[in-house]
Image: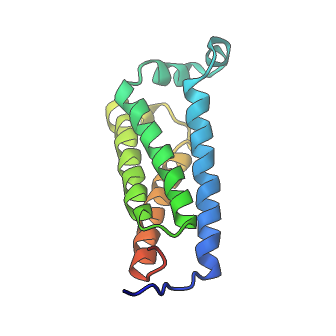
Amino acid sequence: MMTDKAKAPIWFWLVGVVALLWNGLGVLAYLQQVTMSAAEFAALPELQQDLLSTQPLWVTAAFAIAVFAGFVASICWLLQKRVTVRLFLLSLLAVIVQFSSYFIIDGYMEFISGQGWIMPVLILLLAAGLAGISWRAEQDGLLR
């Protein structure tokens, strides 16, 4: 039985901390959205109110899965657990499902300003990047 594991380099820990912070912000954004008071909702721009009020339950569920799977994956990364890869893949899949509603079904592109596309693209790229780098870390023996 082999118990040796690869010593994790500094970049491994930096990725883990950044991923934990990023996904923690995602969890906070989700909680803020689902616990929003009527007064807070009324303060949103009308277009955002329209998008949120017509959002199907499965989109909210995908949002929850994306952020919580990413957050737990980040913790597992720091604990060097192999399940990290599967959780980051689940998070990526949930992001794709969530954004398919925004961009394909809901016509979100019609509502956003010139720079409104940056955050969704950044979220998708980071989710894909974390899934990819976790797969690589598993291949390199950094996740066990």
Of 50 and 16, which appears nearest the observer? 16
Name the residue at 49% across, 31% down: 111
Left or right: 16 as drawn, with respect to 55: right
- How many numbered discs sit on the rendered protein? 0
Task: Work out whether residue 36 can be spotted.
Answer: yes
Pick the quarter of the image with the C terminus. bottom left
Q: Nearer the viewer, residue 121 or 34?
A: 34
The residue that appears at 61% across and 21% down in the rendered structure is: 36
Rendered location of residue 128, percent (x, y): 43, 61
**Which residue corresponds to the image point at 65% horizontal and 79% vertical from the top-left?**
10
Q: Quadrant of the N terminus?
A: bottom left
Which image quadrant for residue 20?
Answer: bottom right
Q: Residue furthest left?
A: 105
| Image quadrant where residue 19 sits | bottom right
* Residue that protrudes farthest toward the front in the picture: 1
Q: For this view, does 35 lie left or right of residue 63?
A: right
Percent x, y for residue 3?
Answer: 45, 84
Q: Residue at x 65, y 70 (%)?
A: 14
Res. 115 visible in picture: no
Q: Along the horizontal axis of the image, is 69 left or right of 16?
A: left
How far from the left and from the top, in percent, is residue 62?
39, 38
Q: Position of residue 127 (x, y in %)?
A: 46, 57
Q: Up-down: is 50 above or below 112?
A: above
19 or 118, which is in the foreground?
19
Model colouring: rainbow
